[in-house]
Image: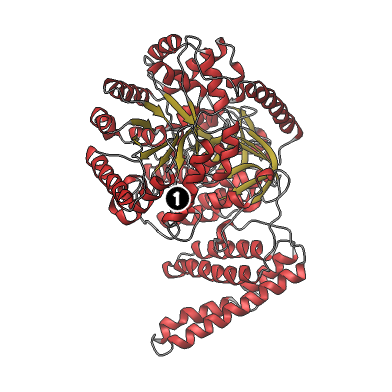
Amino acid sequence: MLSTLRRIIQEVTVAKDLDQALEVIVLRVKKAMDVDVCSVYMTDKVQGENVLMATDGLNDEAVGMVRLKKDQGLIGLVGEREEPVNLDDAPMHPRYQYFPESGEERYHAFLGVPIIHHRELQGVLVVQRHSKRHFSEDKVTFLVTIAAQLAGAIAHAEASGGIDGLHSKARGAAPLQGQPGAPGVAIGTAVVNFTATNLEVIPDRVAGDVKAEVSLFKKAVKDVRKDIQSMLKRMTEILPAEERALFDAYLLMLEGDGISGEVVRRIKQGNWAAGALRETIAEHMSAFDAMEDDYLRERAEDVRDLGRRILEKLRSQEPPKPKKFPIRTVLVGDEITASMLAEVPVKRLAGVVSRRGSQTSHVAILARAMGISAVMGVDELPVSHIDGRSIIVDGYTGRIFINPPPTVRDEFKHLLREEAELSKELRELREKPAITPDNVGIPLYINSGLLADITPSLKSGAEGLGLYRTEFPFMVRDRFPGEDEQCKIYRQVLKSFSPAPVTLRTLDIGGDKMLPYFPIEEDNPFLGWRGIRISLDHPEIFLVQLRAMLRASAGLSNMNLLFPMINSVAEVDDALALLRRAHYELIDSGVSISMPHVGVMIEIPSAVYQVRELARRVNFISVGTNDLTQYLLAVDRNNARVADLYDSLHPAVLRALQQIVDGAKDEKTPIGVCGEMAGDPAAAILLLGMGVDNLSMSAANLPRVKWVIRTFTQRKARMLLKEALTFEYAHLVRHFLNAALEDAGLGGLVRAGR
């Protein structure tokens, strides 16, 4: 049964659209379970109905015609209970609903199981038999396993099919759901960015010159054949004949009407060579995966390897062309990186959509800094099928619409107009101070890491740079930057903001921020070697950075240093010792530099409980709410499956924050918040009430938070905080704060983020 399950999943995963996926399911499941009928009903959320979408056993004309309200029939019963319904004589059940066009009056035994994906009912998988007897426990558990495994594959196939307009009976223009990455709305054209050797995410594109594409492909195959023949020649004296057979198999697959012939056929049908290759390899892998013989199933990986070899040759032949980006480009990919963002001219970049990642991924933070909307963690994103298509990105709710109908497009155009009006109102606050009506000043700073952000940051009304991410200059190079290189960058940042304060965070790599020339392979990188841990383990790198920072501050008095990922007082002591050593080395060489103010980031639960000891050792504390939330809630912030569990307004996070603030205040140490929570207008109310001294956020969020600070007295914020801390659910905290914003006349902030 396990091998059967694997083959079914594989076939559904490579299905071209929802129709094909559902046909595979009913055919394969019926055969595997030896039943008379297998059917799939899909849930139409818009109409509130369960629709028969595929069947093997009922009348074909019933497909798309049999529709039951969500509370109707046995299908509705399965959906309501969210568990299997196993009946020996279904027509006798009071919830049974008969549709003459289905022809199901012949069947008595009924087993239905729900198909659930991300806690939402997608549909119901049903098997039926003529005889009157319950399905055995083995049959029930197998069907439950099938449904659970198929949920994600169906969602992916549904997305692919819906985009091409191949199936509209059940879902219509339903959006794909991800996580809000950066606020805002973008209406534009999808441009798929993909790595040269990742066959699975190669997009479909129209072949501009069919003959040229065929020629490129044939040349690539010829080169691969030469490589394999060369390998075979080298291995003749080393490997026995049976082991060399693999290379012969590769050569055989490249011949005649096999893989090569099928790719050429697809190119002539209109797909470019790389897209045609991806389709062909996926089809062949599916065929091998479906085979009964274990040895033959293993050959699927050989097919994948062959495909990658051809792709590598194919891409290497392509003449370098300047990339063309539409006026409103929405960058789409399996995993978007900072370097991919940098390739798009800023004036043409409207939005970002990534299949992987979350709202606190590095690229999402960059998108917020650049003021472009982003949606992350779209599991069902059919990357291969959306290049060049019209797309709407809703960075507020985490939804994307591909080829949206006019009604949806008009709705979002209206939202864009509302955003423009709100931005105009907020711009009027730029020169006004962030002071509450009861005269409490809360300095608002900017988070950044790009030199290109300096001018927009200065124009935003920020009172300084609260967090400069020094890892960015490391990430865009192919080696560690030298001391002079770093000094030049830091000096430019410090001078641009002087005399306003600038906080330089020391190197914070690891987790989702990797250096291509310093690979870190770990099973759980967020609990591994990152932040200050790497710096302390590599003093030769850390001392270079510290000296560069100190030299950059010569003649200026606005630099603060911040140590990230602090776990214990021992780490602070060691980091301070290295800082003093770097300072002494510069003084000893004749450079006159004063010691800067030093702070630590509170991001780890252990630091929460040692906040007083940490506060005694440093000049200020900065709370990184992104990682603090992740570690307190044990939620990987880059995992879309648990994205809905990640919430900085969780009562446990709020109580930890209050404990941190109280500890810092007891030691008379200034405390600020530099995580994404600082840029959330609703959360800003609570931080004001807690007594946080300053907030640091993206330039796009600063005007919104300033509006909140200038509207709420600290006394009012304390009252709201006290009540918010009584709630047991994060969503109730959010509703409560949104209501407070509405009551204060700041409903535009709530509506813009709906």
Foreground residue, 508 or 299?
508
Identify the residue at horizontal 61%, vertical 44% (top origin). Answer: 159
The answer to which image quadrant residue 453 occupies is top right
Q: Is residue 140 left or right of residue 433?
A: left
For label 1, the residue is 487
- Is residue 409 something that shows in the picture? yes
- Is residue 38 something that shows in the picture? no
Of all residues shown, which one is farthest toward the front?
590
Of all residues shown, which one is farthest toward the bottom?
237
* Image position of 590 with respect to 647: above or below: below
Foreground residue, 44 or 562?
562
* Image position of 639 with respect to 702: above or below: below
Foreground residue, 247 or 366?
366
Q: What amino acid type should be assigned to the residue bearing mark 1?
A: Cys
**Label 1, residues with CA under 10 Å away: few <14, some 14-19, many ≥20:** many
* Image position of 13 with respect to 454: above or below: below
On the image, the x and y values in percent for residue 268 come to 75, 66
- Tell how many labels: 1
On the image, the x and y values in percent for residue 613 come to 23, 30
On the image, the x and y values in percent for residue 528 come to 32, 48
On the image, the x and y values in percent for residue 114 come to 49, 36
* Colour style of the rendered protein structure: secondary structure
Which of the image's four quarters has the N terminus?
bottom left
The answer to which image quadrant residue 3 occupies is bottom left
Which of the image's four quarters has the C terminus?
top right
Secondary structure of the residue carrying numbered label 1: helix
Identify the residue at horizontal 65%, vertical 22% (top origin). Answer: 422
